[in-house]
Amino acid sequence: MTAAVLMAVSALVAGCDQNMTDQPKYQQYEPADLFRDGKVLQKPVPGTVAREDRRYRSEAAVRPPLTKALLERGQTQFNIYCSPCHSRTGDGNGIVVQRGMPAPPSYHSQRLREADDQHFFDVMTNGYGVMYSYASRVRPKDRWAIVAYIRALQLSQNASIDDVPGAEKAKLRSEGRP
């Protein structure tokens, strides 16, 4: 029995001596039977954006004007990418949090209501804490749309009657609302 255990341990230890840096691989320009076109270098998937791409950087630098269409796009993108953790209201109690993931901060906290828009854009771009970067998933113009929607969420949860325009305020009061 001891000999069998000794042989098993010897076999396991011998397997640890593999040189992991010397693995078979293709070089960039050599032919490859692995792909249908026989090339190692493949065209990127449509919509792929290289981080070094000048257009990508310029798109990130240009903040689009606030419009209804931008807010609608922001809501759509927020619901896809952000609400699983942050929830649809931005309170930090999304579905993955309810299943055990750490809760992100609420967008309605004083700290995040006072944060500038660039903070939210940078967090989506670079990640923060346990949140990973969404730079490869969400285009810069959509990150700006999400920022606009986050601001709308913050306003919706922290608004007072003084924030309502005059005509709308009168309508609310006529309906018996404070």
Image (cartoon, rainbow, N blue to C red):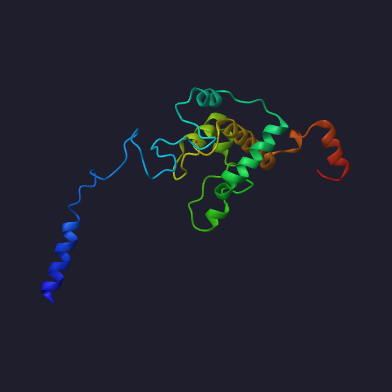
What residue is shown at x 86% (from left), y 46% (from top)? 176
Q: Nearer the viewer, residue 138 or 150?
A: 138
Q: Which image quarter holds the C terminus? A: top right
The quadrant where residue 111 appears = top right
- Residue 112: where, in percent of width, then height? 56, 37
Q: Is residue 47 above or below residue 100?
A: above
Q: Nearer the viewer, residue 93 or 146?
A: 146
What residue is shown at x 47% (from left), y 35% (from top)? 43
How many numbered discs, if any?
0
What residue is shown at x 11% (from left), y 74% (from top)? 2
Q: Which image quarter holds the N terminus? A: bottom left
Residue found at the far left of this picture: 3
Q: Is residue 156 above or below residue 96?
A: above
- Residue 59: where, in percent of width, then height? 55, 25
- In the figure, is residue 2 to the left or right of 60? left
What residue is shown at x 42% (from left), y 43% (from top)? 35
- Residue 52: where, in percent of width, then height? 44, 26
- In the figure, is residue 6 to the left or right of 37? left
Q: Nearer the viewer, residue 150 or 47?
A: 47
- In the figure, is residue 167 to the left or right of 81? right
The quadrant where residue 175 appears = top right
- Residue 114: where, in percent of width, then height? 57, 33
The quadrant where residue 160 appears = top right
> Can the viewer see residue 76?
yes
Residue found at the far bottom of this picture: 1
> Can the viewer see residue 116?
no
